[in-house]
Structure formats: structure tokens, C-alpha cells
Amino acid sequence: MYFRLLQLELKNFIRNPQFGANLFFKIMSLFALANFAVIFVGAAFFIFFIAQNKLHVDPLVLVSKYLVYYLVFDLAVRYFMQQLPTQNIKPFLTQNISKKKLVNYTLLKVITNFFNWGNLLFLIPFAGLMLFNHYNVLGVLMWFLGVFAMFYVNNFINILINGKDNWLYGTVAFFVVFWILDKYEIIELSKLSELVFYSFYNVIGVFVIPILIALFLAYYTYKYILKNFYLDKGLELKKAEGKTENIEFLNKYGVLGAFLNNDIRLIKRSKAAQSAVIGSVMFLFYGLLIYSTKTYETDFMKMFLGIFVTGGFLFIFGQRVPAWDSSYYPLMMTQKVPYRQYLEAKWWLVNLATILCMILAIGYAFISWDLYFTFLAAGVYNLGINSHLTLLSGAYNKNPVDLNTRAKSMGEKNQFNAKNLLLTIPKLLFPMAIFAVMKYFFGMFAAMFTIAVVGAIGFAFRAKIFDFIVKIYIKEKYSAIASFKKND
């Protein structure tokens, strides 16, 4: 049965209207996996020999000391990129197939994901180096099994925090508490990490604890998915008491206001749209992450940060138009929908969010006024240029959105295609090129001013630009309908 399900997924991949885009993404994914494989294997040798020959410390102690930070990073990356693959399983729920088999098949796909076995590319060479350097064989085996089990603990926690808000809030609170304890030196996380993970090696039986935790979480996750594996329950939108939500002042803008009201309702009710908002908030703090590593000091990096800090919602939400409406898009296209107003509503929504991010970014003025003004210039560029380009790229993104699943913008299979890739050049490389040239010849102020002027020009000519964008959307309308129906 599992082999048959795999065959059907393969046929779906080949026969999909977006086969070309899917194939391109698969090829790019293979290159990315090969790159990560080289990095992981190389990291094992690099860390081992640097620790042994340069730092003169036990490599196992060094890895154990900082492993907790990598596990937190691993869980964060999983949250944004790894999603339970229920979209391809939904059609089988109406067939005469045991629900337990479908759940088992779904979990099997998750367990064999690269996020889990990819870590072996580091663990196996590192364990081999330890054995070659006469570490205790039993101790190495125990450490290997214990650490590998921790990645499966992350795997199942990720499934639960994506499906249950209580798990998400609890996990975030747990990390915040330990971060505060470490910041105020009540508990030193690196020493605690060394104590815990090194004990896998030198204390017999401790390695069994993460294995038992992983098995318990696997069983709990299985029961949770089995309980909610229904089209009208866990895999669809939760039903609540019906009520009308309307923002009155938007009504004076006619059709445009009606579409804006619909998008605001979408954000309030949809997990996927809410995760786009959360993601944009996290982008606001992206500058602090770079600031903590001191790389923010280069003016070039300031502009790069500004594009993302002010454009988080723009990139996450904008590139998924019209996919946000994929569940009813075919029906909507049978109506007399004013396409221009439909797209303008999306455009104004992402631009209002961009303006809000520009205002909230005032906090960066406490670091440097130059940094904040650079972010403002980048924000204006986002308003006038990137808003149009991101909306245009959405016309070629025909991957439907499951509104009840937290959006994984970075992980969706059809988020990238050749045309989207080409549109990335003016979105990122073009402003960076303008900034670099103007900064080199005329200085920092001229570079910021030029970026802002280019954005202002794009905003001023938005009517002409929209004429072109609307034509592209109408041209791609029928292939989008076919793709949304195919994946329904």
C-alpha cells in the first residue's frame, strides 16, 4: 500500500500543470542538499581538528558544549521550512483506505525527511574520527545514538507546535526562560549543554533518556494526527460561531474597500495568513541578529537589512497572491470580478504593512540614525518597486495555500520557478547595485537618497505599472485555475 501511495504521488508530480516549475525546484533542491552534505561532512573534520590542534580542547567536549544552540536553531528552521505533508494525502481520505495506513505513511515521510537523516552527515564522520583517535567505542556509540535521538525529538515537537498553539506558546516560553537565566548568569547554558550531552558518552544508560522521549513524542504525535485526520476536522478550517466582521471606514472605498475587508478577515481567521504576519514581525528583528555579530557596520549590509526589515510582510504575503484565495479562486473567476481592484487591494495591504514596519523600525535609531535612515530609504524602495515586483511574481506562483496550516513560505514546493528567480534580481540585486555605485562615487547620503527616489518614482507611476501587472494576471488566470483545481 505504501509503495502504491508513493507511485500516485509520483504521477501527481509528473502530470501536474506546474511540472516544469516543480522539476526546476527539485533540481535546485538536489544541488542544495549536495551543498549541505559537503558542509556537514566538512564541519565534522573542521571542528574536530580545530578543537584538537588549535584550541587544544577535547572535540567531544566542544561539540557537546554548543550542541544545545544548534538544536534550538534546528527547531527554528524546521518550524519555518518543515511541514506535515497532508496536502497530497487529503484525496485518499475519501477512498477505501485505512486511516491508520495513511497516518503511518504521512509520519514515514516526515521521519525520512532530510532534516532528520541529514544530520548523520555530521554525526557519522565525527564519530568515526573519535574512534580513530581511540575514544571508548561504547561511549561513542552511546553519544551517537543519544544525539541522533535529539533530532527526532525536535522533529516531533515541530509537528506538535505547528498543530497545537499550546505547544507553540509553551516551547517559546521554555526557551525564553532559559535565555533569561543564561543572560543574567543564573544558569550558563553552554556548561549545562556540556554536562548533559557529554554524559551520553561517559555515563552508561543516560543516552536512553532522549530515545525514550523521542518514542513517547512519536506515539503522542501519532495519536494526535490520527485523532484529527479528517477532512472536516484536523485538515480543514476550525468552525466557529458565524459572525459578520466589517471595518466600516473601508466601505467608502467601494470595491477596493470590500476586497481589503476580505483580506483582513483572512488574516484574522487563517493560520497560514497569521503566520505571514508573525514572520513579518520576526523580520523586523532581523537587523538585531546581524547587529549582534557586528556585521551591520558595513553600509552595504545596512541596505540589505533594510529591504528585509521593512519588507517582511510584503515578501511573505505578496508572493502568494492569488494563492491565498486558491480555495475559491475558480469560483471567483466565474463572477464579474474587477481584477484591477482585486490586485490593488492586495497591493495596498502589503504597502500599509510596509509603512507600519518603517515606523516600527524607529527602534533602530537607538543603534544609529544612519541605520534607520537607510531602512527608511529601503522601505520607500519596497513601496514603489518591490511591491509591484512581488505582486508580479505572485502571478507565476500557482501553489495553493492550505489556510488551516501555518504557511511555510520558504518550504513550499512551487515557491520558486525560473520567472520568480529572474524577478529576484531587481528585488534584491538592483537596489544593492544602485546603492553600491552611488555610495562609492558620491557617498552615503547620495546612495540613500537615490534609492528613495527610485522607489518614489515607482510609486508615482503605479497606475501604468498596474496596467502591465493586470495583463499578466489575466494571461496566467486559466493556468492558475487549472493548478488550484488540480491540487484541491
Image: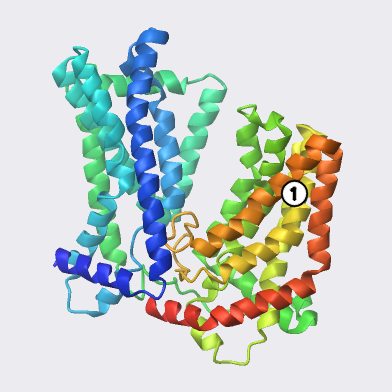
Is 13 left, or right, of 430 in this rendering?
left
Q: Residue 280's x, y, as percent? A: 61, 53
Q: Residue 310's x, y, as percent? A: 70, 50
Is 9 left, or right, of 326 in this rendering?
left
Quick one: quadrant of the N terminus? bottom left
Q: Nearer the viewer, residue 256 or 119?
A: 119
Q: Which residue is mark 1?
A: 378
Give the residue drawn at x 65%, y 27%: 294
Q: Residue 398's x, y, as percent? A: 48, 71
Is 156 left, or right, of 456 in this rendering?
left
Q: Quadrant of residue 207?
A: top left
Q: Is residue 245 in view from this perspective?
A: no
Q: Is residue 402 in view from this perspective?
A: yes
Q: Residue 195's x, y, as percent? A: 34, 19
Give the residue drawn at x 53%, y 19%: 185
Quick one: quadrant of the C terminus? bottom left
Q: Secondary structure at mark 1?
A: helix
**Residue extending furthest toward the top:** 56
Q: Quadrant of residue 171?
A: top left
Tell me the kind of residue under disc 1.
Ala
Q: Nearer the viewer, residue 30 or 205?
A: 30
Give the residue drawn at x 29%, y 19%: 198
User: Compared to 336, does 43 lie above or below?
Assistant: above
Q: Quadrant of residue 444?
A: top right
Give the residue drawn at x 21%, y 23%: 128
Residue neighbourhood size for the residue with mark 1, other residues' Cα within 10 Å, grouped as few (<14), some (14–19), many (≥20):
many
